[in-house]
Image: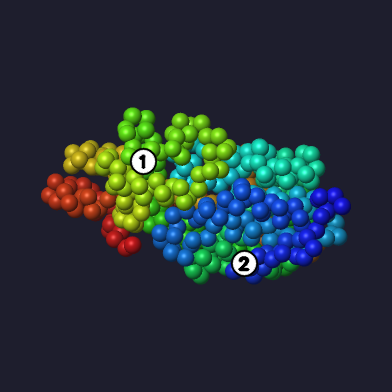
Amino acid sequence: MAYKDEQLHEEKVFKDPVHRYVHVRDRVIWDLIATPEFQRLRRVSQLGTTNITFHGAEHSRFNHSLGVYEIVRRILYNFRGLPHWNDDERLLCLCAALLHDLGHGPFSHSFEKVFKLDHEYFTQAIITGDTYVHRILERVRPGFAKDVADVIGKTYADKLVVSLISSQIDADRMDYLQRDAYYTGVSYGHFDMERILRVMRPMEDQVVIKSSGMHAVEDYIMSRYQMYWQVYFHPVTRSAEVILTKILHRAKYLYENNYTFKLDPTHFLSFFKGKVSLKEYIRLDETIVYYYFQQWQDEEDAILSDLCERFINRRLFKYVDFNPNVQLQELMRLQVLFQEVGIDPNYYLVVDSSSDLPYDFYRPGEEEERLPIHLLMPTHELKELSRHSDIVDAISGKKRTDHKLYFPLDFLEEKGAAATEIMEILSRQGEIDYAD
Ligand code: NI
């Protein structure tokens, strides 16, 4: 039997708290899960520093990837025999679902910002490079790895296949919303996925939703909206992320200025130099990052050691609302005052902005052209979701941004009277958030 058609003698199942069970029957999927590149995802957390705020959020990219695979498996089970669906694409979809986040590194967001990396590039590189994953995919047929990479990169010719993995209602989002809600313990994020899966229909170039399922989709859009503001952009989580980012900046700066580390940053060298090989990228996971941060608490450099101690022991920066676009004068004044009292504003005075666009219809020519969600009406015509749903219409195309200014209140308090003007400016922004 051809490798692509090989089935396991017995179905394997993974117990999953979100989907109850993840079912694996295909030999190819089973072999991919066993590769070192996929197993590495156990050591990369799904939500980065969110566990600082919501202590239950310890789940990994491994859990999420299996979950996305399982959702696609269920969708395709429902699609069998329907018009527009070509079941020859099944294994390709399952592989793309399983591997879509393969290139995520530890604390992706901060690493990408500081070292100008792109996890999507590394996902492509792992799938098409000299890896175990690549060898398995090429056993299916020559060129199969490239097809999987194209589906994930959204350049694959069959747009129906692409929309299963990435669109405004795709398996990726449906998994992470429910999974992140489950592990953080919040009551947002839940919606009736079973219902959505039952009303999904394949069309020529996209998945559409039977109009009878519109309310389940509204619920999904709202839960996404709430998860962004209640969980993903939580200001305390961002405080930890600000510190993490500054640790990486400081370590890189010290390396470039010939500082002698007590613990040589061996695993970071290629990141500092801006030339990261695939092998080095795959080797860096969160266990290694935590090891360095633990050790760097004892470094001579006061800034590096303090930031690492803050990150490890959750001694976070406090914050106030602050819009740098309209408060540039205040920001510049604060920078000067920080210098004067001997606190380096480059590391200890940080503006962080988060923004989200909950749903949007198609706007040709815009930066990121979003494929809208289409409802299949009883008359067989397609209708864009926000034209039929008042709830979705209300938040459609509305980008919301939140700006915060982060600073170490404990340092300022130590300065006493010398920090009076700083405290005055900060207090004018509203109450300093002490809640942690
Ligand atoms: Ni994902």
Q: Position of residue 131 (x, y in %)?
A: 65, 41
Q: Position of residue 60 (x, y in %)?
A: 54, 57
Mark 2 Cα-neighbour bin, 10 Å: few <14, some 14–19, many ≥20: some
Q: Is residue 86 above or below residue 299?
A: below
Quarter-of-image position of residue 349: top left
- Judge whether residue 106 can be spotted in this image: yes
Mark 1 Cα-neighbour bin, 10 Å: few <14, some 14–19, many ≥20: few
> Which label sits on residue 320?
none
Report if the CB atoms under discs 1 and 2 are less than 8 Å apart.
no
Relative side of 181 to 248, left or right: right
Q: Label 2, on which residue? A: 16
Q: Is residue 412 above or below residue 80?
A: above
221 or 190: which is nearer to us? 190
Q: Label 1, on which residue? A: 263
Residue drawn at point x = 38 percent, y = 52 percent: 240
Residue drawn at point x = 67 percent, y = 68 percent: 21
Does label 1 or label 2 sit earlier along the sequence?
Answer: 2
Name the residue furthest left. Answer: 417
Q: Position of residue 431 (x, y in %)?
A: 28, 58
121 or 156: which is nearer to us? 121
Relative side of 29 to 218, left or right: right
Q: Quadrant of the C terminus?
A: bottom left
Question: Which one is in front in this view, the residue at disc 1 or the one at disc 2?
Answer: 1
Residue type beneath disc 2: Asp
Q: How is the image coloured?
A: rainbow
Secondary structure state at the residue bearing disc 2: strand
Relative side of 46 to 32, left or right: left
Residue drawn at point x = 18 percent, y = 39 percent: 340
Relative side of 274 to 339, left or right: right
For marks 1 and 2, give the CA distance: 39 Å
